[in-house]
Amino acid sequence: TNMKIDLEELENTMIKYSSVLNLKNSEGEIQWNRYSAMLVVNTIFIGFIGFTYNKDFSFPWFFKIIFWLIPVLGLLLCHLWHKMTERGFMWSEFWMIKANKIEGQINGKINPIKEGEELRNILGKGVTKNASFMIIGIFAFIYILMFINNIISLFLITNIFSHYY
Protein backbone atom coordinates (compact mmCIF):
# COMPACT_ATOMS: atom_id res chain seq x y z
CA THR A 1 0.00 0.00 0.00
CA ASN A 2 2.90 2.35 0.70
CA MET A 3 4.12 1.87 -2.88
CA LYS A 4 0.61 2.66 -4.16
CA ILE A 5 0.56 5.95 -2.21
CA ASP A 6 3.99 6.88 -3.57
CA LEU A 7 2.90 6.20 -7.16
CA GLU A 8 -0.28 8.19 -6.62
CA GLU A 9 1.71 11.07 -5.13
CA LEU A 10 4.19 10.93 -8.01
CA GLU A 11 1.32 11.01 -10.51
CA ASN A 12 -0.24 14.03 -8.74
CA THR A 13 3.13 15.77 -8.67
CA MET A 14 3.62 15.16 -12.38
CA ILE A 15 0.13 16.54 -13.12
CA LYS A 16 0.98 19.64 -11.07
CA TYR A 17 4.30 19.94 -12.90
CA SER A 18 2.61 19.73 -16.27
CA SER A 19 -0.03 22.28 -15.21
CA VAL A 20 2.59 24.73 -13.97
CA LEU A 21 4.53 24.46 -17.23
CA ASN A 22 1.32 25.02 -19.21
CA LEU A 23 0.57 28.12 -17.12
CA LYS A 24 4.12 29.40 -17.66
CA ASN A 25 3.88 28.83 -21.43
CA SER A 26 0.47 30.47 -21.56
CA GLU A 27 1.72 33.49 -19.62
CA GLY A 28 4.74 33.78 -21.91
CA GLU A 29 2.55 33.71 -25.00
CA ILE A 30 0.16 36.31 -23.55
CA GLN A 31 3.08 38.49 -22.52
CA TRP A 32 4.67 38.55 -25.97
CA ASN A 33 1.30 39.15 -27.64
CA ARG A 34 0.79 42.19 -25.36
CA TYR A 35 4.35 43.33 -26.00
CA SER A 36 3.92 43.06 -29.78
CA ALA A 37 0.62 44.97 -29.68
CA MET A 38 2.20 47.78 -27.66
CA LEU A 39 5.17 47.86 -30.05
CA VAL A 40 2.82 48.27 -33.01
CA VAL A 41 0.78 51.02 -31.30
CA ASN A 42 3.94 52.94 -30.39
CA THR A 43 5.25 52.60 -33.94
CA ILE A 44 1.95 53.99 -35.26
CA PHE A 45 2.11 56.91 -32.78
CA ILE A 46 5.62 57.80 -33.91
CA GLY A 47 4.52 57.46 -37.54
CA PHE A 48 1.72 59.97 -36.94
CA ILE A 49 4.18 62.36 -35.34
CA GLY A 50 6.42 61.94 -38.39
CA PHE A 51 3.63 63.37 -40.55
CA THR A 52 3.79 66.64 -38.61
CA TYR A 53 7.41 67.14 -39.68
CA ASN A 54 6.54 66.67 -43.34
CA LYS A 55 6.00 70.08 -44.91
CA ASP A 56 4.06 68.60 -47.86
CA PHE A 57 1.11 67.75 -45.59
CA SER A 58 -1.18 70.41 -44.21
CA PHE A 59 -3.37 69.48 -41.29
CA PRO A 60 -6.29 71.33 -39.70
CA TRP A 61 -5.45 72.93 -36.33
CA PHE A 62 -7.42 70.26 -34.44
CA PHE A 63 -5.14 67.49 -35.75
CA LYS A 64 -2.05 69.58 -35.04
CA ILE A 65 -3.11 69.80 -31.39
CA ILE A 66 -3.68 66.03 -31.27
CA PHE A 67 -0.27 65.42 -32.88
CA TRP A 68 1.27 67.81 -30.36
CA LEU A 69 -0.19 65.71 -27.52
CA ILE A 70 0.88 62.35 -28.92
CA PRO A 71 4.31 62.42 -27.16
CA VAL A 72 2.50 62.83 -23.81
CA LEU A 73 0.14 59.97 -24.69
CA GLY A 74 3.13 57.96 -25.92
CA LEU A 75 4.94 58.40 -22.60
CA LEU A 76 1.82 57.23 -20.77
CA LEU A 77 1.62 54.26 -23.13
CA CYS A 78 5.31 53.45 -22.48
CA HIS A 79 4.65 53.52 -18.74
CA LEU A 80 1.74 51.08 -19.15
CA TRP A 81 3.79 48.95 -21.54
CA HIS A 82 6.62 48.78 -18.98
CA LYS A 83 4.23 47.78 -16.16
CA MET A 84 2.55 45.10 -18.30
CA THR A 85 5.91 43.67 -19.38
CA GLU A 86 7.23 43.75 -15.82
CA ARG A 87 4.15 41.88 -14.60
CA GLY A 88 4.46 39.31 -17.40
CA PHE A 89 8.08 38.58 -16.49
CA MET A 90 7.10 38.37 -12.82
CA TRP A 91 4.46 35.72 -13.56
CA SER A 92 6.78 33.77 -15.87
CA GLU A 93 9.44 33.73 -13.16
CA PHE A 94 6.84 32.73 -10.55
CA TRP A 95 5.75 29.70 -12.60
CA MET A 96 9.38 28.73 -13.32
CA ILE A 97 10.15 28.76 -9.58
CA LYS A 98 7.09 26.58 -8.94
CA ALA A 99 8.11 24.17 -11.72
CA ASN A 100 11.63 24.04 -10.31
CA LYS A 101 10.31 23.09 -6.85
CA ILE A 102 8.02 20.41 -8.26
CA GLU A 103 10.83 19.09 -10.48
CA GLY A 104 12.91 18.64 -7.32
CA GLN A 105 10.16 16.43 -5.87
CA ILE A 106 10.06 14.15 -8.92
CA ASN A 107 13.76 13.15 -8.70
CA GLY A 108 14.11 12.33 -12.36
CA LYS A 109 17.31 11.93 -14.34
CA ILE A 110 16.25 14.69 -16.70
CA ASN A 111 15.47 18.06 -15.10
CA PRO A 112 14.79 20.56 -17.91
CA ILE A 113 13.86 23.47 -15.62
CA LYS A 114 16.93 23.13 -13.40
CA GLU A 115 19.22 22.52 -16.40
CA GLY A 116 17.67 25.44 -18.26
CA GLU A 117 18.23 27.71 -15.26
CA GLU A 118 21.88 26.65 -15.05
CA LEU A 119 22.38 27.35 -18.77
CA ARG A 120 20.55 30.70 -18.48
CA ASN A 121 22.87 31.67 -15.62
CA ILE A 122 25.90 30.85 -17.78
CA LEU A 123 24.58 32.83 -20.78
CA GLY A 124 23.38 35.72 -18.66
CA LYS A 125 20.15 35.87 -16.72
CA GLY A 126 17.69 38.59 -17.68
CA VAL A 127 19.07 39.35 -21.16
CA THR A 128 15.65 39.18 -22.85
CA LYS A 129 13.98 41.07 -20.02
CA ASN A 130 16.59 43.84 -20.12
CA ALA A 131 16.42 44.08 -23.92
CA SER A 132 12.62 44.37 -23.87
CA PHE A 133 12.80 47.14 -21.25
CA MET A 134 15.51 48.90 -23.27
CA ILE A 135 13.23 48.96 -26.33
CA ILE A 136 10.48 50.53 -24.21
CA GLY A 137 13.06 53.05 -22.94
CA ILE A 138 14.09 53.95 -26.49
CA PHE A 139 10.47 54.71 -27.39
CA ALA A 140 10.08 56.78 -24.20
CA PHE A 141 13.26 58.70 -25.04
CA ILE A 142 11.97 59.45 -28.55
CA TYR A 143 8.70 60.74 -27.05
CA ILE A 144 10.63 62.93 -24.60
CA LEU A 145 12.71 64.41 -27.43
CA MET A 146 9.56 65.06 -29.47
CA PHE A 147 7.87 66.66 -26.48
CA ILE A 148 10.88 68.94 -25.89
CA ASN A 149 10.84 69.83 -29.58
CA ASN A 150 7.12 70.69 -29.33
CA ILE A 151 7.75 72.92 -26.29
CA ILE A 152 10.62 74.72 -28.05
CA SER A 153 8.48 75.16 -31.18
CA LEU A 154 5.63 76.54 -29.08
CA PHE A 155 7.93 79.08 -27.42
CA LEU A 156 9.40 80.10 -30.79
CA ILE A 157 5.92 80.56 -32.29
CA THR A 158 4.77 82.49 -29.20
CA ASN A 159 7.85 84.73 -29.36
CA ILE A 160 7.38 85.39 -33.09
CA PHE A 161 3.72 86.30 -32.61
CA SER A 162 4.44 88.50 -29.60
CA HIS A 163 7.24 90.24 -31.53
CA TYR A 164 5.03 91.09 -34.53
CA TYR A 165 1.76 91.78 -32.75
Image (cartoon, helix red, strand yellow):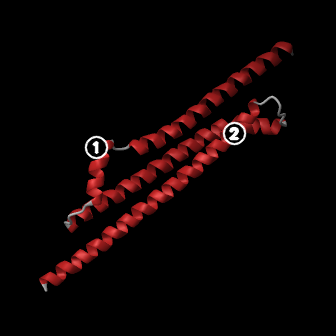
The residue under the point 45% across, 59% down is: 27
Q: Quadrant of the C terminus?
A: top right
Circle 2: residue type: Gly
Please give the name of the residue rendered at 67% of the width and 44% of the height, measured from the top-left corner. 44
Which residue is denoted by mark 2 in the rendering?
A: 47
Q: From what the image shows, is residue 66 above or below residue 164? A: below
The furthest residue to the top: 163
Query: Looking at the picture, does residue 21 appear above or below residue 2?
Result: above
| Element marked by disc 1 | helix
Instruction: Tell me the distance, in whole angstroms, between the alpha carbons under discs 2 and 1.
Output: 39 Å
* Of pointers 2 and 1, the one earlier in the residue sequence: 2
Q: Is residue 145 above or below residue 59?
A: above
* Horizontal side, residue 165 vs residue 41: left or right: right
| Residue 77 percent coordinates (x, y) | 59, 44
- Is residue 113 or residue 68 the one in the foreground? 113
Q: Which residue position holds label 1?
A: 122
Instruction: Residue at the far front: name it.
Output: 109
